[in-house]
Structures are given as C-alpha cells and as structure tokens.
Amino acid sequence: ARVIGVARSVKKFDGSLSLIRQVNSVYKLSLCAADISEPGAMERVLNNFALTPADIDIAILNAGIKQASVDFIECDAMRNTFEVNFWGAVQCADSFVKVWKSLQQQKNLIFVSSTGRWHGMPASGGYNASKAALSIFVDSLRLDLKKRGIDSIRITTIEPGLIHTGMVQQKGIQKLLSITSEKAAEKILKAIVQQKYTSHFPYFFVMFTFLI
C-alpha cells in the first residue's frame, strides 16, 4: 500500500518517517508539506506524486488547529480556525468527491471532527464551533450522496475526545481521560474497516461528554 501524509511542516516528522520505514517496509510512506486551507491544495499535493483523486482509495481529513484566546471573542483567530478545521476539510473533500462520484470503485472519505462539537468549553469557542459545523456538513453530504444514489463513497465521521497531542495537557484530568495518538489511529482504522458512520472515543471521555 502507498500512504501519503500531508502536514504544514514535515521537518518534525523526519525522525518518525525514518523509523516507520525501518519497522515496516511494506508501506510506501511519503510526506508532503501543504496548507490545506488554501484552495486547490489537495490537487497540488497529488500532482507532486503524479497522482489524481481517482488513485486514492481512502482519504483521512484530520487537519485541525486550536488557537489560544486572550479576549472573549477574537474574530481573526476564530476565522483562521474555521479556515483550517472547516473549510480546509470541505475543500479537500470537494477535490475527491467531484471525481469519485462518477467512479464505480469503493472509496472512503474520513472526516476527523471532535466530541467537543456537542458542547461549549472554556477558551474553545472557535474550535468547537468549527468542528460542529464540520460534523453537520458531513451529515448533509452523506444524505446528498444517498439521495443521488451514489453508494460507492463511504463516509465516516470520527469524533474523538482528548488525544495526546499538542492540544492536550499531559497531566491531571486531561491525561487521565486521554489516549495516545497510536491508539486513536487504531480506532480510526477499525471504524473504516467496520464501515461505521460515526466513531467516538476514548470511552470515559465520551461518557463524561454526554453526561454534561
């Protein structure tokens, strides 16, 4: 299998990339730097590898940022958050769907939203709102595809809670309720294989979320 990863900067992944290639030579893994909030970014990424959307079987759209707010409402920060978390995912999805819709092969489109889309949180208004918008968009896209009889595109919404990333503090309650990025990746792959509409994790954080 061939795997292409896209990040704003690939420098910090150089060590991980070498390790992955040493551990598992079965997968041909490549990384490319791109700002997916820019229109046409996905097409440019694929062109770098002489590929088109038709060559991709699974697309996982997981770009996300959360900007710290000093004031109650910071429009520029919120707008930037939406550009990446919502519009970045929508534009990438458009790159695939407009090609995939006319194909017979099974394709999988995976959107990474957030459990935070179900409620507000302190200093998270822009982030949670952008993820809420993304989840509603995905629900609508799924219905639109079904209405047009396009069943070759499977859509899964991933709504994780706390994962060990730069957004999560590695102490206290956040550490207790979070899981590693490796475990999260396993759950995402499981959701794809099982053809789930939606996947929520980790368990205790999800239970806490829906209780409040």
Image: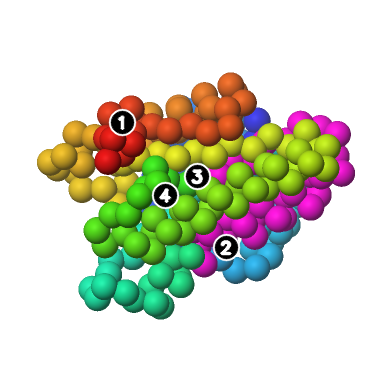
Disc 3 designates what residue? Answer: 112
Answer with mark 4 or mark 2, whichever residue precedes in sequence: 2
**Magenta span of residues:** 83-111
Q: Position of residue 81 (x, y in %)?
A: 44, 65
Indicate which label's residue lies in the foreground, 4 or 3.
4
Q: Residue at x 69, y 34 (%)?
A: 154
Q: Residues within 10 Å of mark 4 (few under 14, many from 20)?
A: many
Label 1 sits on a secondary structure element that is helix
Is 117 included in the stretch rendered in magenta?
A: no
Residue under pointer 2: 87
The location of residue 120, given as percent across then percent down, is: 32, 54
Q: Which numbered mark, 4 or 2, is in the foreground of this view?
A: 4
Residue 207, which numbered label? 1
Label 3 vs label 1: CA separation?
19 Å
Q: Residue furthest top?
A: 194
Q: Is residue 88 magenta?
A: yes
Can residue 61 be seen in the rendering of this structure?
no
Are the residues at dot 3 and dot 2 in contact (C-beta closer than 8 Å)? no
- Could you tell whether 51 is left or right of 88 in the image? right
Q: Residue at x 51, y 56 (%)?
A: 133
Q: Which secondary structure lies at badge 3?
A: strand
Closer to the chain start, of discs 4 and 3, is 3
Tell me the kind of residue under disc 4: Arg
**Residue highlighted by disc 4:** 117
